[in-house]
Amino acid sequence: MSVAAFAYIQRWRYWLLAGLALAAIVLSACQPQNLKSQAARIPQLVISTTTDPKTFNYALNNSVPNVFSFTFDGLVDEHGLTAEVVPALAESWQVSADKKRITFTLREGMKWSDGQPLTADDVLFSYKDVYLNETIPTDVRDSFRIGEKKLLPDVKKLDDRRIEFILPEPSSPFVRALVAKILPAHSLRQTVFTKGPDGNPRFLSTWGTDTNPTEIVTNGPYTIESYTSSQRIVYRRNPYYWRKGAQGEALPYIDRIIWQVVENSDGRMLRFRSGDLDMAGLRPEDFSLLKREEQRGKFAILNGGAASGTTFIALNQNRATNADGKPFVDPIKTRWFTNKAFRQAIAYALDRQSIINNLFRGIGELQNSPISVQSPYFLSPQQGLKVYEHNPQKAKALLTGAGFKYDPKGQLFDADGNRIRFTMILPAGSRSGQQFAAQMQQDLKRIGIQLDLNPVDFNVMVESVGNRNWECYFISYTGGVEPNDGANYWTSSGTSHDFNQGPSVGSPPIKNWVVSDWEQEIDRLFIAGAREYDENKRKQIYADFQRIVQEQLPVIHLVTPTALSAIRDRVKGVQFSGLDTRGSLWNVYELKVTNN
């Protein structure tokens, strides 16, 4: 089962409510006073997460929060300030003249957290036996599909430190996709090739959250020391981590990280203000309150500019049925949702500027593109991108022109007399998110549409979307600078193509799935964009993509919040920007904490 995080390959799929704040209340059993006393004895960082992780198995993960930015590295990484592709486990790589062979050289002498050598065998296992293995239902694989036929690359070991990827055709974003984490062959290989009682590879049930965390072998800066459901995860410094400091000293500097499970934004702010947390992402309403407390509270508020990513609502346009012929979505509502005029009317009805003014306290800007504003491929309204300014009368005109009708009470009906009413699901843990949704509910009421709100547990939402059992959802995704990272969501064959999800490996079969002409054109553009190396031509390709999205509105973009983070003065080395999707922790390995 797949679902679209904040996605895109993992970093785009992450389900974050960014400035809408899915944040947290920690259970009293976490005993913050004990955490403080521990922090006084060892270098320790106390932060928060929004909900429990779903798995400790990276290949099977499809949501945030997750443990993997602390526990695993890939061949390459993205710099948290510039989004530049930088070496990680691979110290270098070479691209052949025909751009179809890429050879990576691993760093010398690396080890896993259990002391075993990390070699090209682990890279070969991770890619050939897991990510490129069609019997393993991993969403990571989508980021490696190349060309019109969605072919996968081949991979081979040259020696203990060199691995070569052989591509079916040139792919300009391929190297960036190799942020995928490298897994330990010596711990996991047997699980891939043996089957459990259900007939599936044991790998699919390996390293779940019921696993003893000390059994998880990692290559990142931290291992998992302990996990208490609904309370906290404790990370311990990996003694074999490959990075070294400027003087050759072992990294990371911080011995332990306490990751408290905090389920709403008010609780998170309460704990930060009381000193129980060392850092916290801020909502707009938190800013003015905390700004007055900076000096007394010994912290600083960092402004990272526009947050990377997109916030939007989507309507489920899937006309498919399950194997028994039962539609996933009520066909009456599907007829509304697949009507472009209906979607455009909703876009015109939403008063996004009022949301910024009233709910975001003016700290944000209108969002009109599926590509993050920091990307060089971003197309602005000034460059001709279509926008939907608040205009209820235009919304009503579009609806009546499409055959919808109003009764004397101003309620909207379709041509068959069906009242226009549908349900929006959204994560339940954010007061500001609830306010945002309530504003949209009122906006749609003004054009005769009844929008019912269904706040649910985040994991319930993931389950619903993955099963295609939803009508409308409200969500945010993290972003990045490379548009192809969104192929998993935007291409019709992507396993996170939520608004019209097709068949997927490992899921029950579906029938009568229909792909629209404009979806096929987006497919073509993403193939062309991946093949193209000329930057000016790539910009034109992705400009066309953005124009289609804003014309067809498979999702309706809302606002871009400003990225704000409050950091204790005792935490040193934080480098924060709107591109940082890891909560001010992209360079966690070089952060330091003091005890004053």
Image (spheres, grey):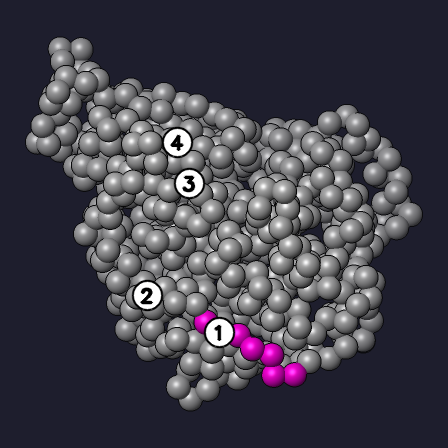
In the rendered structure, are the residues bearing label 3 and label 4 in contact, judged by CB atoms less than 8 Å apart? no
Say the numbered circle drawn on residue 154. 1
Q: Is residue 10 left or right of residue 586?
A: left
Q: Amino acid at mark 2?
A: Lys
For residue 470, what is the image quadrant? top left
Mark earlier in primary sequence (4, 1): 1
Instruction: Mark 2 vs mark 3: give the one in front.
Output: 3
In the rendered structure, are the residues bearing label 1 and label 2 in contact, judged by CB atoms less than 8 Å apart? no
Mark earlier in primary sequence (1, 2): 2
Residue closest to the eye, 57 or 551: 57
Residue 18 higher or lower than 89, as above or below: above
Residue closest to the eye, 302 or 48: 48
**Can residue 268 be seen?**
no
| Residue appearing at x 39%, y 75% in the figure | 168
| Secondary element at image label 2 | loop
Q: In the image, residue 195 lies at what x, y percent?
A: 62, 50
Instruction: Mark 1 vs mark 3: give the one in front.
Output: 3
Q: In the image, residue 345 lies at what x, y percent?
A: 20, 34
What residue is disc 3 on?
Answer: 508
Q: Amino acid at mark 4?
A: Asn
| Residue appearing at x 18%, y 36% in the figure | 339
Q: Amino acid at mark 3?
A: Pro
Q: Which residues are magenta?
A: 153-159
Say the numbered circle drawn on residue 469. 4
Q: Is residue 154 magenta?
A: yes
| Residue farthest bottom in this picture | 97
In the rendered structure, are the residues bearing label 1 and label 3 in contact, judged by CB atoms less than 8 Å apart? no
Q: Amino acid at mark 1?
A: Asp
Residue 451 higher or lower than 77, as above or below: above
**Can residue 142 be seen?**
yes
Mark 1 and mark 3: Cα distance apart in space: 28 Å
